[in-house]
Image (cartoon, rainbow, N blue to C red):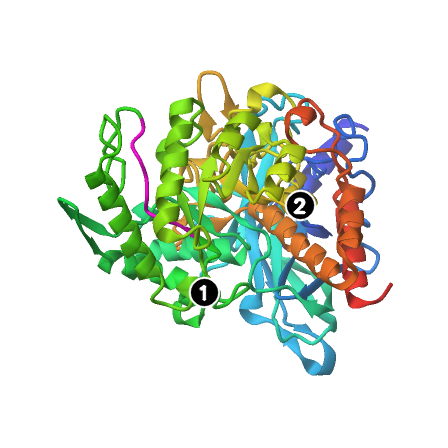
């Protein structure tokens, strides 16, 4: 090419880039199980060098939810379920004023799904610079990862809709595309059948339409969530109650509850006389215990409507080492329990039980006593205290009224010494031995797993989180599947850890010997971006997908037997996640999310009686 031709081409490119009328933005779609690089347009999960069955191929033209030839997104959902997909808006020249709207989906008999049941989010990207500790082989590596999902809101506020590509707020070098997440909630009264609508993408100088086709299955996911568990949180109790409520509701829409330790009534002790003041406690907590927090009264919509929490942590605690002030209602005397000390604990327990028995909805909520002062304590003195407090509370509350919970990776010998006092064993996944759990379950001790799904290396064993930005999203989705596989409850550590800085710093957990990206980070603090609500993440959506999948397995088991649900789950998760026997094993399940979605589709067809 001559110099004159080169100059002409350059001038033409500059003209195209500066002319809104000619700038072109292409649109394609992808499912909810992968992320797209904003710089290359490739799937971040497209790494067959890590796992040979990661997704590959020309997914811009066709994938599990997208047909480029007809420009159609096809998804499926039961009633009372969220379905989701992503629109990828690709522009190789700058475009401005990008916006996305969804028309109501029209279905059988003119029925519609619209309004708040259709949600559009703009992805926010954070830069991962190095692998999370312990995942140097499985890490998807340095990249800009989409995670926070910013809801639509009135224009004029920073970082929301409409936006530009490249995004002037996110500042991603070489950005050529932007992800927009779409959530569709199928109401409980939706008629089964096919619904269609349109996703309208507009920008300064152009527009593009995509057809959205939704099939609603003829069954409904339950409002009382089947998987047992929660995500521990340390920040909610310090929030104003109206702010805390929004976090509870966002968690509830994603089928989990916060595990908050510990709400407490006011306490006065005079000798052996105990006075509890429940005024502030009831004002803050009662709406979660009677289910009204999840109704129109407080502006709630979605799954779990009107249902009370599945469980609540009771206010009891004991001293830990020299820290005696944490004990509630009273610290044990240094020389051991006295009659006065036991009288205070017993009277407090009696009043706690009486208060919870006053309301019929409160009585539906499981009560759990967990003594944080004995958390992960591995010595005989600690075991003796666990036995003591478990039996003390049993004598007042009754063994069938509550569960006495311990957390830690205890040996068989330790558990055998405590088994008569223990009802619930929350075991870190590094120590979770499936066979041992089944054995103690047969003795009446329920088990929940707590921590990462995969242990590439032992040095990750100190982490209680399962949310790492640089691992594929199946690690989040797998929670629901593994909970079904092992008939176990589940716990995670934190969902808004370092949630202010996480908008700009992927390494939100740092110590001298380890760093984690996105650890305990499922919900972002909205006020950073001038929102008056918490902001969900793609990681949170992936976890929701797995918890919804669990409900499919339960419905399938109720209809055709547990063996049928087990066949589908075990066909995907062929290895043994976590535990000593799984240490260093990284090939645990099929890594292409299409296989997971196809398995869910098979379960749906079986529930609907179509196969």
Q: Position of residue 518 (x, y in %)?
A: 52, 34
Query: In which quarter of the view is residue 432 placed?
Result: top right
Question: Does the segment drawn in magenta span residue 318?
Answer: yes
Residue name at image x 65 percent, y 63 percent: 200
Question: Does the segment drawn in magenta span residue 265?
Answer: no
Instruction: Give the magenta range.
Output: 312-320
Residue behind mark 2: 91
Q: Residue furthest top?
A: 513
Real-space CA distance between mark 1 and mark 2, rounded to the nearest whole angstrom:
41 Å
Q: Locate the C terminus and report the quarter of the image it occupies.
A: bottom right
Q: Position of residue 483 (x, y in %)?
A: 64, 45
Residue behind mark 1: 294
Query: Could you tell me which secondary element the residue under label 2 belongs to?
Result: loop
- Please say if 508 is above or below 90: above
Q: Position of residue 441 (x, y in %)?
A: 60, 42
Q: Position of residue 35 (x, y in %)?
A: 66, 41
Query: Could you tell me which secondary element the residue under label 1 belongs to?
Result: helix
């Amino acid at each position: 090419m001559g110099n004159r031709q080169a100059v002409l081409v350059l001038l033409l490119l500059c003209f195209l880039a500066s002319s809104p009328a000619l700038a072109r933005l292409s649109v394609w779609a992808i499912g909810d199980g992968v992320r797209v690089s904003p710089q290359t347009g490739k799937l971040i999960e497209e790494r067959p060098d890590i796992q040979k069955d990661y997704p590959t191929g020309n997914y811009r033209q066709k994938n599990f939810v997208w047909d480029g030839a007809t420009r159609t997104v096809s998804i499926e959902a039961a009633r009372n379920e969220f379905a989701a997909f992503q629109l990828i808006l690709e522009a190789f020249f700058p475009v401005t004023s990008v916006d996305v709207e969804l028309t109501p989906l029209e279905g059988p008999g003119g029925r519609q799904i619209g309004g708040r049941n259709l949600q559009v989010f703009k992805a926010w990207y954070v830069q991962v610079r190095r692998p999370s500790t312990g995942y140097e082989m499985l890490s998807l590596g340095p990249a800009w990862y989409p995670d926070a999902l910013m809801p639509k809101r009135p224009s004029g506020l920073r970082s929301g809709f409409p936006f530009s590509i490249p995004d002037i707020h996110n500042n991603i070098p070489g950005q050529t595309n932007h992800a927009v997440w779409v959530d569709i909630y199928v109401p409980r009264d939706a008629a089964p059948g096919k619904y269609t609508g349109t996703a309208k993408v507009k920008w300064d100088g152009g527009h593009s339409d995509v057809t959205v086709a939704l099939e609603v299955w003829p069954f409904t996911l339950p409002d009382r969530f089947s998987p047992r568990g929660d995500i521990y949180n340390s920040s909610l109790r310090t929030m104003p109650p109206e702010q805390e409520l929004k976090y509870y509701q966002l968690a509830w829409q994603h089928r989990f509850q916060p595990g908050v330790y510990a709400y407490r009534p006011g306490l006065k002790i005079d000798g052996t006389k105990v006075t509890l003041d429940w005024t502030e406690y009831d004002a803050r907590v009662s709406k979660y215990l009677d289910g009204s927090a999840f109704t129109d009264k407080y502006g709630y919509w979605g799954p779990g409507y009107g249902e009370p929490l599945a469980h609540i942590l009771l206010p009891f605690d004991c001293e830990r080492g020299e820290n005696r002030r944490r004990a509630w209602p009273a610290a044990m005397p240094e020389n051991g329990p006295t009659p006065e000390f036991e009288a205070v604990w017993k009277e407090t327990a009696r009043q706690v039980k009486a208060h919870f028995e006053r309301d019929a909805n409160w009585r539906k909520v499981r009560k759990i006593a967990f003594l944080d002062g004995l958390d992960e304590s591995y010595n005989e003195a600690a075991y003796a205290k666990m036995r003591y407090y478990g039996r003390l509370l049993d004598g007042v509350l009754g063994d069938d009224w509550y569960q006495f919970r311990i957390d830690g990776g205890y040996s068989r010998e330790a558990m055998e010494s405590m088994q008569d006092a223990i009802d619930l064993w929350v075991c870190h996944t590094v120590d979770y031995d499936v066979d041992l759990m089944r054995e103690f379950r047969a003795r009446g001790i329920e088990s929940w797993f707590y921590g990462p799904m995969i242990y590439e290396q032992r040095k990750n064993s100190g982490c209680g989180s399962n949310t790492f930005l640089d691992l594929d999203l199946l690690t989040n989705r797998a929670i629901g599947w593994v909970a079904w596989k092992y008939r176990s409850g589940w716990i995670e550590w934190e969902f808004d850890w370092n949630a202010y800085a996480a908008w700009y710093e992927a390494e939100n957990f740092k110590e001298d010997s380890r760093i984690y990206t996105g650890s305990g980070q499922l919900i972002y603090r909205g006020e950073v971006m001038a929102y008056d609500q918490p902001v969900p993440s793609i990681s949170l959506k992936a976890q929701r997908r797995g918890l919804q999948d669990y409900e499919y397995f339960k419905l399938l088991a109720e209809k055709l037997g547990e063996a049928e649900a087990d066949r589908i789950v075990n066909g995907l998760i062929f290895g043994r996640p976590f535990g000593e026997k799984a240490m260093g094993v990284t090939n645990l399940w099929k890594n292409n999310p299409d296989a997971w979605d196809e398995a869910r589709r098979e379960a749906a067809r079986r529930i609907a009686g179509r196969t």
